[in-house]
Amino acid sequence: MMKTTNSISVLSDPPSRSCLCSLFIAAALICSVYFIGSSFVAKENKERLMRWGLVHSMYSAKPETCKNQQCRLPGTEALPEGIVSKTSNLEMRPLWSSPSKLNNQRPPMNLLAIAAGIKQKKIVDQIVRKFPSKDFVVMLFHYDGVVDEWKDLVWADRAIHVSAANQTKWWFAKRFLHPDIVAEYNYIFLWDEDIGVENFNPRRYLSIVKDEGLEISQPALDPVKSEVHHPITARRRNSKAHRRMYKYKGSGRCDDYSTAPPCIGWVEMMAPVFSRAAWRCAWYMIQNDLIHAWGLDIQLGYCAQVIFYKPITSISHSLCCINGI
Ligand SMILES: *[C@@H]1O[C@H](CO)[C@@H](O)[C@H](O)[C@H]1NC(C)=O
């Protein structure tokens, strides 16, 4: 197994988590956050959540309808209707260009954001080359202060480079991927830099994600080449995606009745892929002081539930873990 350097361990998750993980899209992939269940269970859980004071925020997340400009964006009250730009994007604009020309360019539809150090230049280059420029905006979060040394790569000019010393992917994501800024992108790939992509095809991946209706997903890991810490993330044959794992022996059993991570509702923090709606939810869950995002993986299931107001069959372990650093 190819080991990537851990010399940046101050900046990344501990060595055990920064293995070179190979993603296989060809055979059968994606494990995901997904919840099914009877309304009975949902009701029971809703009651439990209510006791935890959680339901209010989860069930009142539907956008309010605005009538007669009753709810203008704060600070825009003085503006006439029609000149407010609520959202933006990461599209770079030419200094001089006629608007008509610009309008003909269709902006890419998805975003690939990677926290990268120069020591991983080669593997990051391999990752980015896999993502078609027609479909993906690329953003690099440089945590080691080195930006110029990326310039020779063919895609460097079209990537957006953000540099801040010794920060983690989650720090960058919270600051630079505000949901209103990335509102135009259908899917957001928020990836670590040490992901092996020999067998990964982003378009195929997204077609499966859409077919399966997955709001939050990750590529399944090659069980041979990767260190698989949670069996649910291991690639399985004979299915395009899986949403739960089974374990009938020993401790930590998982069966069809399991309702919580790691049996279902789990993605790792290493290579998550969010739908636009799920990212809006997840962004709010990233605390400002979050570093390695330990514990966030267990909570992400809430974001997959909130989006569709699906019956909640899973109460994640507890709320303590969201601060788990
Ligand atoms: C970043 O971390 C490295 C390694 O700990 C340290 O040598 C360097 O001074 C740090 N840089 C900044 C700007 O804090």
Image (cartoon, rainbow, N blue to C red):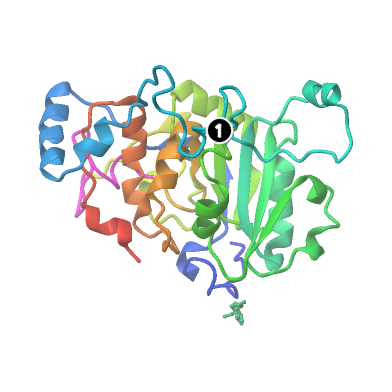
Image position of 185 with respect to 145: above or below: above
Query: Which element carries disc 1, helix, strand or loop?
Result: loop
Residue at image location 62% in from the left, 34% down from the top:
110
Along the viewing direction, whichever of 75 and 230 lies nearer the viewer: 75
In the visual, does 105 lie left or right of 283? Answer: right
The residue sitting at the top extreme is 68
In the visual, does 281 lie left or right of 250? Answer: right
Q: Quadrant of residue 169?
A: bottom right
Q: Amino acid at mark 1?
A: Lys
Whether the magenta-drawn stretch holds residue 260 is answered as yes
Q: Quadrant of residue 59?
A: top left
Image position of 182 with respect to 116: above or below: above
Residue at image location 29% in from the left, 26% down from the top:
309
Q: Which residues are magenta?
A: 248-266
Question: x and y percent of residue 261 in the render?
Answer: 28, 46
Residue at image location 67% in from the left, 41% down from the top:
90
Instruction: Please identify the quadrant where the C terminus is shown.
Output: bottom left
Instruction: Please identify the quadrant where the N terminus is shown.
Output: bottom right
